[in-house]
């Protein structure tokens, strides 16, 4: 099921900046929300660094980037420090936001079916409607460039 064309689900989560974040506070802005399995792991690091490398170009266009995983704020802090990430990471320990955005569920890891975070991304328009959804991101290291290409098209 696709979220494209639908109102983005609301959320209220703790951010790595020490503040609570909700979708409402970003009304009028384009928001890239990317969901990833775990801080400081190879694929997630490549993806985060890609968004970091595209950060200036995206923010120059008024885009907000939010990364979401079930990791703790402390883990997010280390991840941000290790890789100089310039955007907020949200902590979703009970996976409620990920479930609302279809970013949590059955996946295959190391040949086994497991339940977990599905690497995915949504772009929410200034009107709160999902403009684009990547339900399953195959290549973490290439994905930030796909997002940038979509925004700049």
Image (cartoon, rainbow, N blue to C red):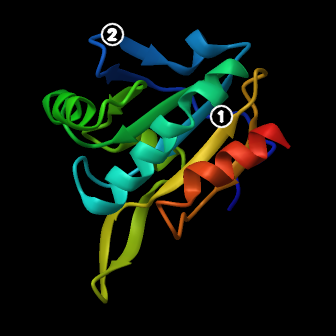
Q: Does any portion of residue 150 appear in the rendered image? A: yes
User: For mark 1, does the 10 Å Cα neighbourhood hold few (<14), some (14 to 19), or many (20 or more) residues?
Assistant: many
Q: Nearer the viewer, residue 117 or 76?
A: 76
Q: According to the image, label 1 marks what residue? A: 8
Q: Say which quarter of the image contains residue 113.
A: bottom left
Q: Is residue 15 left or right of residue 4?
A: left
SS for dot 2: loop
* Image disc number at residue 68: none
Could you say where residue 131 lies in the image, as x and y percent from the top left?
77, 41
Quick one: 90 or 88, which is closer to the camera? 88
Among all residues in the image, which is located at the extreme bottom? 111
For this rendering, which residue is in front, 77 or 120? 77
Q: Is residue 23 above or below residue 107?
A: above
CA neighbours of label 2 inside 10 A, class few (<14), some (14 to 19), many (20+): few
Labels 2 & 1 near each other (Cβ < 8 A)? no
Q: Residue at x 70, y 17 (%)?
A: 29
Q: Is residue 134 above or below residue 74?
A: below
The picture places residue 1, in percent across and down from the top left corner, at 68, 62
Residue 102: tell me if it is visible.
no
- Left or right? Give the position of 152 relative to 8: right
Q: Position of residue 108 (x, y in %)?
A: 37, 80
In this rendering, the label closer to the viewer, 2 or 1: 2
Look at mark 2 in the image and give the residue it sits on: 19
Question: Quarter holding the C terminus?
Answer: top right
Q: Residue at x 27, y 84 (%)?
A: 110
| Quadrant in which residue 116 is drawn | bottom left
Report helix, strand or loop for mark 1. Answer: loop
In the displayed image of the protein, which residue is found farthest to the right? 153
Q: What separation in Å lies between label 2 and label 1 (alpha carbons)?
A: 21 Å
Residue at x-position 48% and y-position 46%: 50
């Amino acid at each position: 099921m696709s979220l494209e064309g639908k109102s983005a689900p609301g959320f209220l989560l703790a951010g790595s900046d020490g503040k609570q974040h909700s979708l409402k506070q970003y009304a009028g802005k384009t928001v890239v929300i990317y969901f990833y399995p775990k801080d400081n792991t190879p694929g997630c690091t490549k993806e985060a660094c890609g968004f970091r490398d595209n950060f200036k170009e995206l923010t120059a266009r008024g885009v907000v980037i939010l990364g979401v995983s079930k990791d703790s704020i402390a883990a997010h802090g280390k991840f941000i420090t290790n890789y100089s990430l310039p955007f907020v990471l949200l902590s979703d320990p009970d996976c409620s936001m990920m479930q609302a955005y279809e970013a949590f569920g059955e996946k295959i890891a190391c040949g086994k079916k497991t339940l977990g975070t599905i690497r995915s991304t949504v772009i929410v328009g200034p009107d709160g409607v999902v403009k684009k959804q990547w339900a399953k991101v195959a290549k973490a290291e290439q994905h930030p460039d796909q997002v940038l290409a979509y925004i700049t098209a």
